Structure formats: C-alpha cells, structure tokens
C-alpha cells in the first residue's frame, strides 16, 4: 500500500525513508512513507486521498523528538519545506506559518521592530513544534503570544480555533480533537521591540551554557516546579555519563549528545537511567520534554 502511495505522489513522497536524515540527533529507523508537501493544496489533496485511519506523524525540523531504531509505521508528514511565511494581518497581529523556524521569527521581529520575540531564538525547532508543546525559553512561552490557530485534520479539513479551545500548561498542550497546526495568529507589537542587543545577549548566553555545535535535541527534561532539570542531573553526578555513543553533555546536563553512531536505544536507556538516578537522589520524577516515537528494533 505505501509503495503505491509513494508512486502516486512520487515528486513529494518516499518509501522506507531513514528518519536519521530528518532529526537533530541524526538517529531513527525508517518511516513507511515520508511526505513533504509543497503547498496547502497538495497537503489537502494528499490527506483526502489516503485512508484517514492510517497513523500520521508530523514533524518540522526534527528537534525534540527521538525516533526509535525500528522506525515509524504509517505516514510521516514534514512541514520543513513549506509553510514558511510570516504575514502582517492587522496592526498588532501576524500570521506565522508552522514551518517557520523559531529563530527566523525572532530575526523577523528584530528587523521589523516588534516583539516580544527574542525568546524564540532559544528554541531550536519550528513554530509548529513550538505550538504542539508550548515551547519556551528565557521565561516566556509560545502560547503567551497566540490568539488563534489554523489547523488541519486527518481528512484534510482546515479550520480556525481560538486559543481557548486548548488546555495549555508548561510544555503541554491538550488538543480538542486530532489535529495539526498550519499557522497561528500572534500578537506582536512595537511596544515590546525585539532588539539586536536582545538577540546577541541571548545567543551569547546559549553559547556559554549549551552544546550548540553538537548533535542534541535541545532540553531532554522539563524543569520541575521550583527547580532545574539540568542542575538536578548535574548534582546526581551524571555529567559526561555515557551509554554507548550517547552522553550527558559536559556543558549542560539537560542535553544528551550523540557522539557519533549512537542508537535510539542508547539515548532512551540514558534517559531512563537519568530519571532513575535523580529520583533516587532527590525523590523527584523528571518528566520528558523530548517526544519518543516509533518502534523499537
């Protein structure tokens, strides 16, 4: 079945696609079908053409996900090659599409003297992923600015939902039905400008404290109330601890590094070991920020 779909949409579809090519960790088995649409029209046609009961996984820039070594069953849809626009729709509202990289939004806001958006420069993924998990950095979160979202369901139906349609918490968003984000309407004002100095300061802070030049997914664990996951992991003596070719960063303990050749199993086992060590030492159960998807080999 998947081969036939790939042949039908051959310009945008591939069969048995290695997910290691599409994740920031450079890890992951193959997806049955990988679809990278060029437009909304193509996406709607694709979804309306396939069996709506097929499993569908959406990805953007492939940060904040660990794809298991056995790969992903069903269809993976990537927004990386489209949904790239930022459009002013009224005095303080901007339509930001899901494929826009978070850092690109920060730079757009700096160029146009609007904000507050400097914090987006600290989020490694795209706006679609940031909406899905309410990503944040430096004390702000994505949904702080969102007024409305444009979504699509498994049949290809597009609708608009107000922010109040979702239950939103720290790094968590609960959806009213099965959906994926196409864009959002954000409130951005010249009253809270994003300046070049803001971006330089935050960039320098990240360079000092995070392993930006290495293969990671960003933060692995959520910060527990009143504490920091990285500090708890470091105080558990785990900086530099390795399983296979996966290690806890010496620079920031809430980052796991693929040193080259790590498997998803290595990283998943390292995550489990870290949670257990912190639980035993501090009686705190760290919750994952990274999503683990797919099947074990």
Image: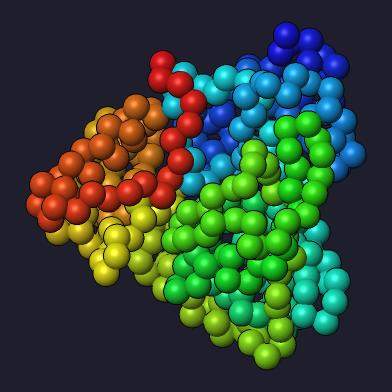
Q: What is the residue that sits farthest to the right in this orientation?
A: 41
Taking 102 as reference, is 174 above or below it? Answer: above
Q: Is residue 161 visible?
A: yes
Does 206 sit left or right of 148 as displayed?
A: left
Residue 199 screen position, x and y as percent: 56, 77
Residue 81 in view, yes or no? no
Frontmost residue, 269 versus 213: 269
Against 255, residue 54 (above or below) is above
Q: What residue occupies the far bottom of the structure in this picture?
A: 191
- Residue sitting at x 71%, y 83%: 189
Q: Is residue 67 left or right of residue 106?
A: left
| Quarter of the image where one finds residue 13 | top right
Q: Residue at the location (14% across, 52% down)? A: 283
Q: Position of residue 122 (x, y in %)?
A: 51, 65
Residue that appears at 33% across and 49% down: 287
Picture coordinates of residue 11, whole percent (x, y): 84, 26
Farthest left residue in view: 281
Q: Is residue 24 left or right of residue 50?
A: left
Counting from the top left corner in percent of width and height, residue 120 is at: 57, 67
Closer-to-camera residue (40/24): 40
In terms of depth relative to the viewer, which is nearer, 19 or 212? Answer: 19
On screen, residue 134 versus residue 179, left or right, reads left
Please, which colouring scheme is shown? rainbow
Q: Quadrant of the N terminus?
A: top right
Label count reads 0
Residue at horizontal 23 percent and vertical 62 percent from the top: 231
């Amino acid at each position: 079945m998947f081969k036939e779909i790939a042949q039908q949409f051959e310009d945008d579809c591939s069969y048995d696609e290695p997910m290691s090519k599409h994740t920031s960790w450079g890890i992951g088995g193959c997806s049955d079908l990988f679809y990278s649409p060029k437009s909304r029209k193509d996406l709607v046609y694709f979804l309306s053409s396939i069996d709506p009961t097929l499993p569908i996984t959406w990805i953007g820039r492939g940060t904040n996900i660990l794809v298991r070594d056995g790969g992903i069953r069903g269809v993976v849809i990537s927004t990386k090659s489209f949904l790239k626009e930022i459009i002013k729709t009224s005095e303080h509202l901007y339509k930001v599409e899901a494929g826009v990289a978070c850092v690109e939004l920060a730079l757009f806001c700096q160029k146009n003297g609007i904000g507050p958006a400097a914090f987006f420069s600290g989020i490694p993924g795209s706006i679609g992923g940031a909406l899905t998990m309410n990503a944040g950095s430096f004390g702000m979160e994505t949904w702080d600015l969102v007024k409305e979202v444009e979504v699509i369901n498994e049949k290809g139906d597009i609708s608009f939902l107000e922010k109040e349609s979702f239950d939103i918490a720290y790094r968590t968003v609960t959806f009213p039905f099965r959906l994926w984000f196409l864009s959002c309407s954000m409130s951005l004002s010249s009253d809270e400008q994003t300046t070049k100095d803001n971006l330089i300061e935050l960039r320098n802070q990240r360079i000092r404290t995070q392993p930006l030049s290495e293969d990671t997914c960003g933060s692995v664990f959520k910060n527990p109330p009143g504490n920091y996951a990285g500090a708890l992991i470091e105080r558990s003596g785990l900086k530099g601890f390795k399983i296979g070719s996966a290690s806890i960063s010496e620079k920031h303990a809430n980052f796991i590094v693929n040193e080259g050749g790590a498997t998803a199993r290595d990283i998943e086992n390292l995550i489990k070991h870290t949670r257990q060590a912190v639980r035993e030492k501090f009686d705190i159960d760290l919750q994952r920020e990274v999503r683990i998807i797919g099947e074990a080999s």
